[in-house]
Image: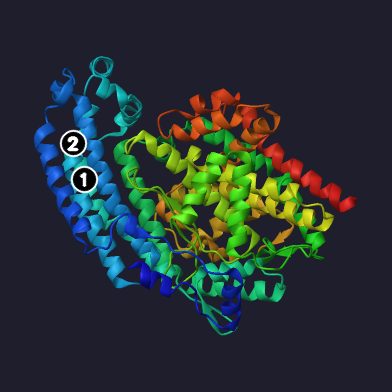
């Protein structure tokens, strides 16, 4: 899709109310994917596609079966040279995949985009099959030999963090032919069902007073002041989810079984161990986090929602009232220019360099902001590759939460820019730490806005919204994690019906939300739209990890006289080269300490205390 056609569909046309809202937001930017390639038919794109295939074959011919010998050499014949070639190829393939993926997510309803995405994925999978030997063969080299190699060969030593990290996968590797089968079959198993979910979700429309709207717009209506509009949106969501529940149930069952097969073959003991390994975090640390959050449900979500029900004049809130704005909440939409200035100002007050990096996303068209038919719902920051730059997708509708989402995704973007200096192999940060910069960016923005607010009613509304966002990030995500654990455990005993999955969903929601929220008919289907369950099983605990970590980190920042910003930037620049324990040590923090999570949760509790004091004052 060309930039021109993208700009022609900036706003989602769905009636006069939506058109008026679009006008209030101002012109919303679309990203400039030509920074990656001019188009899918350009000689740059087709040339790189051919080049990547040839380089992959040449790499296999040059190095396969020879890495043990290369580990005893230096220079062009050594492991360091092989790693440099491998990284360069990884960058080219990553650029190709990023262009196809971002084009697809710009409009998943366009058959040409779907074909491009599928074809590129298939070809890159074929190329990856020629490279699969490399990490497997490296891990068969004796530890002592590899240590000596990294000490003797400076080029290999440069990649030490990646090589050390790679060896953590060693106990779960299969033989080469099985690994190749898993790789090639991924296109027709997990990847295929991921795409089916994305395209189905993008096509869904929700009928609200005769206006058929996409998911993002319907979910946004759950934050409207009018309780009847919230109810209608909730019922429309439930009705459409229910009508499509068979396909979502099939997708969930298939992916859970697919994961179970892979885990069994690889020898993972616990259903979430593969995610913990990918996150480079110990199971005990995640278990401690989940236990601490569950134990805090009554002090956090149960307590807050009881207060909110009273503010809304209800004995019990309906499930569609959970994110309803308080009567004190300003109703005016926030124009895009104001959102931009709000985030950049907050970032700049913390560190001018942080604002300078974030400003590039606006100035150089790295952001796609408008809601439009076929566009992927939600928000994300995609790092692409170090030789290019990240891109941010949001669905901006002018709500205060949309400003916080922008701050969140730009936090990711700044992190990805800074970590890019580590190169294609070592820039990727484990999910647990990847959420650090995003949540920190949100916190900076919130605190900057709160500090400027002197009106008591407005301050209450802001505090309430922040508490809700933190509950959604910590309590809700751990409830999601518990739901996934229940689904994947139950799937081991056979297929789950839609009712089975709905019952598991309601059990964790009831426990986490508490008695102040009435969970009525329709809500049992709401598990169906959560993309993390499909794309990245057990991803969700990373949000709670990141939020609690940032709460502790922000407390250090508030008490630090100087030097915090420099240490924080070093954390971000590290990318995937250091374990969380190494990165947190300069701040005096330790995620393995049982009290660590309690400190993070206490900040949320403190904000609820402040709200309660405002309410009584």
- Point out residue 603 in the picture as x, y percentages from the top left corner: 70, 39
Q: Give residue 193's quadrant in the image.
A: bottom left
Label 2 environment density (alpha carbons within 10 Å; few <14, some 14–19, many ≥20): many
Q: How is the image coloured?
A: rainbow
The tag earlier along the polypeptide, 1 or 2, is: 1
Which residue appears farthest toward the left when viewing the image? 61
Residue of label 1? 128
Q: Which mark is residue 133?
A: 2
Q: Is residue 138 left or right of residue 205?
A: left
Asked where in the image residue 222 lies, by quadrant, the reply is: bottom right
Q: Looking at the image, do the residues carrying marks 1 and 2 touch, with CB atoms under 8 Å apart? A: no
The residue carrying pointer 1 sits among few (fewer than 14), some (14 to 19) or many (20 or more) residues within 10 Å by Cα, namely many
In what quadrant of the picture does the N terminus appear?
Answer: bottom left
Residue 596 seen in the current view: yes
Q: Is residue 563 left or right of residue 466?
A: left
Q: Residue at x 57, y 51 (%)?
A: 407
| Occupied quadrant, residue 297 | top right
Which of the pair 205/23 is nearer the observer?
23
Residue that appears at 78% across and 53% down? 459
With respect to residue 14, does 59 lie above or below?
above
Residue 188 in the figure: left or right of residue 298: left
Secondary element at image label 1: helix
- Image coords of residue 140 (percent x, y): 21, 25
Q: Check the image and name the residue furthest to the right.
A: 617
Q: Position of residue 304 (x, y in %)?
A: 75, 51
Q: In the rendered view, would you say 147 is above or below 10? A: above
């Amino acid at each position: 899709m060309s930039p021109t056609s993208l700009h022609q569909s900036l706003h989602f046309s769905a009636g006069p109310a939506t058109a008026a809202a679009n006008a209030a937001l101002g012109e919303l930017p679309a990203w400039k994917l030509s920074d990656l390639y001019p188009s899918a038919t350009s000689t740059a794109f087709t040339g790189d596609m051919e080049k990547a295939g040839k380089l992959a074959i040449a790499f296999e011919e040059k190095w396969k079966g020879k890495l043990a010998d290369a580990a005893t050499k230096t220079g062009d014949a050594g492991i360091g040279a092989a790693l440099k070639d491998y990284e360069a190829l990884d960058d080219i393939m990553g650029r190709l995949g990023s262009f196809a993926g971002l084009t697809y997510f710009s409009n998943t309803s366009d058959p040409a985009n779907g074909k491009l995405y599928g074809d590129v994925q298939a070809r890159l999978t074929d190329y990856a099959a020629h490279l699969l030997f490399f990490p497997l063969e490296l891990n068969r080299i004796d530890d002592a030999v590899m240590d000596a190699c990294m000490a003797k060969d400076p080029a290999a030593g440069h990649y030490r963090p990646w090589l050390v990290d790679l060896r953590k996968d060693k106990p779960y590797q299969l033989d080469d032919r099985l690994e190749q089968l898993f790789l090639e079959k991924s296109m027709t198993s997990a990847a295929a069902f991921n795409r089916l979910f994305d395209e189905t979700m993008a096509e869904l429309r929700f009928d609200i007073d005769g206006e058929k709207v996409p998911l993002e717009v319907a979910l946004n209506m759950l934050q409207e002041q009018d309780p009847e509009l919230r109810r209608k949106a909730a019922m429309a969501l439930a009705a459409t989810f229910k009508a499509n529940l068979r396909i979502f149930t099939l997708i969930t069952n298939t992916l859970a079984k697919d994961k179970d097969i892979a885990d069994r073959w690889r020898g993972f003991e616990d259903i979430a161990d593969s995610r913990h390994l990918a996150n480079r975090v110990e199971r005990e640390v995640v278990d401690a986090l989940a236990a601490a959050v569950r134990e805090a449900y009554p002090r956090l979500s149960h307590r807050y929602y009881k207060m909110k029900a009273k503010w809304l004049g209800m004995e019990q809130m309906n499930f569609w009232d959970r994110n309803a704005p308080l009567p004190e909440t300003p109703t005016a939409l926030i124009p895009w220019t104001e959102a931009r200035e709000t985030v950049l100002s907050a970032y700049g007050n913390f560190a001018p360099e942080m604002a300078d990096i974030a400003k590039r996303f606006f100035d150089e068209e790295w952001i796609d902001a408008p809601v439009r038919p076929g566009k992927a719902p939600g928000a994300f920051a995609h790092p692409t590759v170090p030789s290019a730059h990240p891109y941010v997708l949001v669905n901006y509708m002018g709500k205060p939460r949309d400003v916080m989402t922008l701050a969140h995704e730009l936090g990711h973007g700044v992190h990805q820019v800074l970590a890019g200096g580590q190169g294609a192999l070592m820039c990727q940060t484990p999910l647990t730490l990847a959420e650090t910069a995003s949540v920190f960016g949100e916190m900076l923005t919130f605190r900057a806005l709160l500090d400027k607010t002197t009106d008591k009613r407005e301050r209450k509304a802001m505090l309430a919204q922040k508490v809700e966002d933190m509950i959604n990030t910590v309590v809700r995500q751990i409830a999601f994690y518990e739901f996934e654990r229940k689904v994947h455990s139950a799937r081991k005993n056979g297929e789950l019906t839609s009712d089975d999955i709905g019952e598991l969903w309601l059990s964790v929601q009831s426990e986490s939300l508490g008695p102040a929220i009435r969970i009525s008919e329709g809500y049992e289907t709401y598990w169906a739209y959560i993309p993390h369950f499909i794309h990245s099983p057990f991803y969700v605990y990373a949000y709670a990890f990141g939020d609690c970590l940032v709460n502790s980190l922000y407390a250090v920042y508030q008490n630090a006289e100087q030097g915090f910003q420099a240490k924080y930037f070093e954390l971000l620049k590290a990318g995937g080269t250091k374990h969380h324990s190494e990165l947190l040590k300069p701040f005096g923090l330790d995620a393995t300490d049982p009290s660590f999570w309690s400190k993070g949760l206490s900040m949320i509790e403190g904000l609820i205390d402040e709200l309660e004091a405002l309410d009584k004052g």
